Image (tube, grey):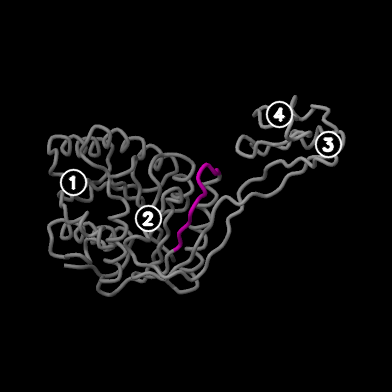
């Protein structure tokens, strides 16, 4: 049975991707090794590939929603489409264009204009919203994606990335799917946590980190996904770290561990490495090993690291 581990954060910049890459490395170093498939579900700003050195195997287009297109040869400029459009996406005729046009950025794809056009001059066409990829990385198969700026349906693209990652895990008998989730609490997060066996929320000891931790916990608990917490850069603000631990205790949420601030995290990223590959003996690396051992025990996976 495949176990799905999703790494989340209520806000960006907490170190979520750094931890995901470290966990992928630790899965490979585990005794015995745990074969894992990786999925980068942060499709708006995918960057797991920056620290896993992937080699591209497949690339696929992602078709999002549809937009309206007006056939100028059939359009009689009656103006009905402009009247029914609630998104102000219809551009009236002008000196350069004698027929009505559609503002493809403003169009919401509702198709109201299609149904109301008496000349049947408007049709809906599929729109490419991004791409998704399958790569071979240092730590196993990696599924990742790019959403075109300003495009929607990021939740659907997250689902595509996750589904293909899970299918690959099934095909290769990999017992673990590690998902680098998107920040926040919106639709992409909901898609990322669907079906997960465990959510690990990475926070930092700041007022914003504490606030967004609460929101992330509320979201994941709403879908009845077990949640654990990791405090990154914990020693930068011990008082706030204690406040976060107190809050988690009140909510009966286990704090897996605290990771000390280490500038080597940034140094490792500059070299395209995770912190474990950079130096497994650093305090931050040792803290991550302890956290990893707790995670695999929670997921009922074998072995561990010392």
- Measuring 73% from the left and 34% from the top, which residue is drawn there? 96
Corner quadrant of residue 302: bottom left
Give the residue at the far top of this rendering.
83
**Which residue is nearer to you in this view: 102 or 161?**
102
Q: Nearer the viewer, mark 2 or mark 3?
A: 3
Q: Is residue 267 above or below residue 302?
A: above
Which one is earlier in the sequence, the residue at label 2 or at label 4?
2
| Alpha carbon separation for disc pair 2 and 3 | 45 Å
- In what element is the residue under mark 4? loop
Task: Give the residue pinned by disc 4.
Answer: 85
Instruction: Tell me if 52 is positioned left or right of 98 in this view.
Output: left
Mark 4, Cα crowd under 10 Å, few <14 / some 14-19 / many 20+, is: some
Q: Nearer the viewer, mark 1 or mark 3?
A: 3
Which one is earlier in the sequence, the residue at label 4 or at label 3?
3
* Quadrant, the N terminus: bottom left
Mark 2, Cα crowd under 10 Å, few <14 / some 14-19 / many 20+, is: some
- Measuring 64% from the left and 29% from the top, which residue is drawn there? 87
Task: Give the residue pinned by disc 2.
Answer: 47
Task: Give the residue pinned by disc 1.
Answer: 233
Task: Give the residue pinned by disc 3.
Answer: 75
Q: Which of marks 4 and 3 is in front?
A: 3
Specify the segment rendered in magenta: 143-152
Q: Report x, y in % for residue 306.
A: 16, 67
Mark 3, Cα crowd under 10 Å, few <14 / some 14-19 / many 20+, is: some
Give the residue at the far front of this rendering.
95
């Amino acid at each position: 049975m495949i176990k799905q581990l999703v790494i989340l954060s209520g806000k960006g910049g907490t170190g979520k991707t750094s931890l995901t890459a470290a966990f992928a490395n630790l899965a490979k170093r585990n005794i015995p090794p745990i074969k894992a498939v990786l999925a980068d579900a942060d499709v708006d700003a995918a960057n797991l590939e920056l620290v896993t050195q992937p080699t591209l195997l497949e690339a696929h287009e992602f078709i999002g929603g549809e937009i309206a297109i007006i056939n100028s040869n059939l359009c009689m400029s009656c103006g009905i489409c402009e009247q029914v459009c609630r998104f102000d996406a219809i551009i009236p005729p002008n000196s350069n264009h004698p027929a009505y046009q559609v503002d493809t950025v403003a169009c919401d794809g509702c198709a109201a204009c299609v149904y109301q056009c008496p000349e049947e001059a408007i049709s809906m066409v599929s729109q490419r919203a991004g791409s998704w990829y399958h790569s071979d990385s240092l730590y196993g198969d990696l599924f990742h994606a790019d959403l075109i700026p300003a495009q929607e349906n990021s939740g659907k693209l997250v689902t595509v990335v996750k589904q293909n990652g899970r299918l690959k895990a099934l095909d290769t008998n990999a017992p673990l799917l590690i998902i680098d989730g998107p920040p926040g609490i919106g639709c992409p997060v909901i898609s990322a946590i669907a079906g997960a066996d465990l959510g690990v929320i990475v926070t930092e000891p700041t007022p914003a980190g504490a606030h967004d931790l609460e929101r992330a916990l509320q979201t994941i608990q709403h879908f009845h996904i077990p949640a654990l917490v990791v405090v990154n850069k914990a020693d930068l603000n011990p008082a706030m770290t204690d406040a976060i631990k107190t809050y988690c205790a009140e909510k009966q949420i286990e704090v897996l561990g605290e990771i000390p601030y280490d500038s080597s995290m940034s140094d490792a990223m500059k070299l395209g490495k995770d912190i474990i590959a950079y130096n497994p003996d650093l305090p931050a690396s040792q803290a991550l090993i302890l956290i990893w051992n707790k995670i695999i025990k929670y997921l009922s996976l074998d072995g561990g690291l010392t």
